[in-house]
Amino acid sequence: MNRSKFLLFPTVAISSMVTAQVSSVTFSGKVTTKDKEAIPYSNIILKKEKDTAFVAGTITNEEGRFSISGVKPDHYLLEASIAGYNTHKQSVFIGGLSEFLEIPPIELNQKQEKETTIEEVVISASKKNELDNKLDKKTYSVADNISQSGGSVLQSMQNLPGITVQDGKVQLRGNDKVTVLIDGKQTALTGFGSQTGLDNIPSSAIEKIEIINNPSSKYDANGNAGIINIIMKKNKQNGWNGKIGFTAGLGSLWVRKDNLPTIRPQYTLTPKINPSLSLNYRKNKINLFLQADNLYTETLNKNEFVTRTYDNGTVINSQLKRNRNTNFFNTKAGLDWNIDAQNTLTISGMYGSEKIIDRGDQPFFNGDKSQRLRLWQFLEDELKTTIMGSASYQHKFKEAGHLLNVGFNYTFHREDEKYFYDNYLPASTGTDAFKLLSDEQVYDFNVDYIKPLKYGRIETGIKLRSRSIPTNMNFIPGTNSVLDASAGGKADYKEFIPAVYGNYIFENEKWEAELGLRLEYVRIEYDVNPNHPTYKSDGYHYTQPFPNFRLAYKLNDHNKFSVFYNRRVDRPNEVDIRIFPKYDDAEIIKVGNPALRPQFTNSIELGYKYNWDNGYLYSAIYHRFANGTITRISSIVPCSNLIYAIFQNAGKSYNTGLEAIWNQKVSDVYSFNINGNIYRNQINAFTVQNLYPQPNIFSADMQNAVSGNIKLNNIFRFSKGLNIQLTAVYLAPDVIPQGKIKERFTMDIGLKKAIQKGKGELFLNASDLLNTMLIKKNIQGMGFAYTSNDYYETQVVRLGYSYKF
């Protein structure tokens, strides 16, 4: 048994308390007699409690109901009056949690009773700030992220506070176990339960991005790091309106490191083209909308130089260079039908097509690079097609914010992948190929109910998902092939998840609380080719509760303390258990594991927020502990230099850290926010057995490490619509499966200028301005070690224009 050092990639929990808030609340109520009979046409007046200044007024309808919207957080006096009855007065406090509140019925006494009632009512709303908060999330406008305009969603996210990007995946506080939604739904575009495709979705299609670090029970329990919700653009203005845009850019402006001998040139001066169109037409009860975007890019996707050293003394130097052409087209269209004042039906469809062509070279040399041992050249032709259809119905009850939502969503996603490899050896040449076809179908149904209360609201609902992914892999080996042709065939993944949830939110002048529980039943079946040499059909099922809890105490208007608890799960995605070897690298073979089981995580957190007129400071201490930690284990087998990377459940892991965010408006021209995070990760000693390609035991000692990151955003707002953003990001050395990644630094800049009386906009930006982003890794595997430096494309300059009409 070989014992190797190993440390799990960090899993970090952090609060979403550093969030700004919506600007107003709508509250409603009913005016009745003591006998509970409605009093129509009563006068309702809202005044400031401090100086009794008039704020808003209305009258009750024929059912005695009233509603006042657009009220900012503060202390108020509410008066209800009508001829023949005594005037009723209430103190009203509008807080920071709910957009809609229903106050208890107001009972008016007839004048002869000579009685006036004075009560206190607390109504939850929120304050205006730079970010939007509804207790559990932070919201960022994509348009404000000037330094990454015109790129992909992934590039747009990397400058947001609390987010880092590594190996093409978003991390929330260092953890990539993130669930990504589009308009509140899981989709094949971004992955069901995992994240995919974010580097190809154009940011021009996106209105805003919501980050939910501590999701409530109404969200799917999958994703222990939290949820990112991408909100697509959609307008509801009357008549015809829309927006058209065009962005062009160049990347890989020069060669950062020369190729090893005998391979094809790496991409330079790579073009980026992104046209976009948004249309909307609204008349009477119908609202029609259309959003279409196309993002074409050429990219030096990978340029990794690796030195592998084996326990037997063998040293191999290699370079993996991948030139990538990508074209992503996405369109969404639909209609909103306002049937009447209480009922709305929305029907929409989405189509996405992602075409990827990779042309790569991977030469292998001996230790002193005097002899080429092998050249591996490949062509990958991949087409991903996504079709979605959605229908949602909303019923508004008479009380403002009292809602019933019913939704159905269907997704079809096809992966059609073809790989062709030329394998040049000193004595022979061979051509390998394989083809993969996967058709995913998902049916989602949900019912959600929201009821405003005097001191908050309740939320409850049910959700049902049925998902199937039949996959077929066909290997076509050539001379001296490394392909495992016997590992091909068919596999069928089936997922069935019904869930029910309840959530209660409470607020008064001093306390905020949220208590929720989600109960999920999960059944996973994975049927594989019975002739597979290693793996057999497998699956699992469970019924588990997932509670969430938040309690906050407002010491005064400037100080707030909070505590969070959350339990979540990371279910292995289909690609994590997929039995077919994946040859992204000629000698590092990635394979799934059908025996992989879910990872369950508990997190607790203490937070403190201090805010003042022009800014705030937020800090949090957090601790997370996981059981059944999922990670990828790399090892070799006897008589082979091939490395096999296989997912395993590695046992228990822990993460403890401190995060702080300081947001400050210095003047009308300059503001900044700085976000820092430091954490300690630990994984206990464990032993696992890898079955592929033959059984072998891997064992690791307990290990821990400390890491962190810091991000600074500078925003300059000059006169005449000129804005400038400068962002700097430093990532400290960190741990990755079986190794470490060294420190990284990048700086982005962007300029935006409003023109044509505010209808037009020009922007110019540059990512990785100093060309300093370089990925350096050290890996210690079982029987080998390797170091790598990846000089992939990071520096891109873009120029764009958009016009609103």
Image (cartoon, rainbow, N blue to C red):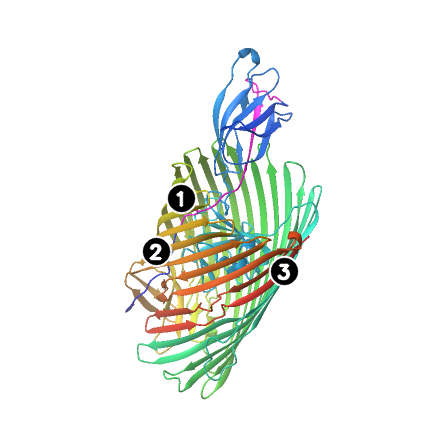
The foreground one among 87 and 664 is 664
Kind of residue sitting beneath label 2: Tyr
In this picture, which residue range is highlighted in magenta?
14-39
Q: Are marks 2 and 3 in contact (CB under 8 Å)?
A: no
Q: Is residue 606 above or below residue 490?
A: above
Please identify the residue farthest to the bottom as the structure is shown: 427
Residue located beneath label 3 in the image: 801
Main SS of residues in magenta: loop
Q: Are marks 2 and 1 in contact (CB under 8 Å)?
A: no
The image quadrant where one finds the N terminus is: bottom left
Q: Residue at x 50, y 44 (%)?
A: 129
User: Could you say where residue 177 lies in the image, as x and y percent from the top left?
Assistant: 43, 56
Q: Quadrant of residue 596?
A: bottom left
Instruction: Using the image, tell me which numbered label, if any, was put on residue 512.
Output: none
Q: Is residue 348 above or below residue 512?
A: below
User: Could you say where residue 371 lies in the image, as x and y percent from the top left?
Assistant: 41, 87
Query: Does the segment drawn in magenta span residue 15?
Result: yes
Residue 277 visible to the viewer: no
User: Could you say where residue 737 lies in the image, as x and y percent from the top left?
Assistant: 37, 64
Q: Is 696 left or right of 16, judged from the image as shown?
A: left
Residue located beneath label 1 in the image: 609
Q: Is 341 left or right of 489, judged from the image as shown?
A: right
Q: Secondary structure at mark 2?
A: strand
Residue located beneath label 2 in the image: 679
Q: Residue at x 51, y 61 (%)?
A: 749
Q: Is residue 583 above or below residue 247?
A: below
* Dot 2 crowding, Cα within 10 Å, few <14, some 14–19, many 20+: many
Kind of residue sitting beneath label 3: Tyr
Q: Secondary structure at mark 3?
A: strand
The foreground one among 17 and 674 is 674
Distance between the alpha carbons at the discs numbered 3 and 1 = 39 Å
Q: Is residue 349 above or below residue 458?
A: below
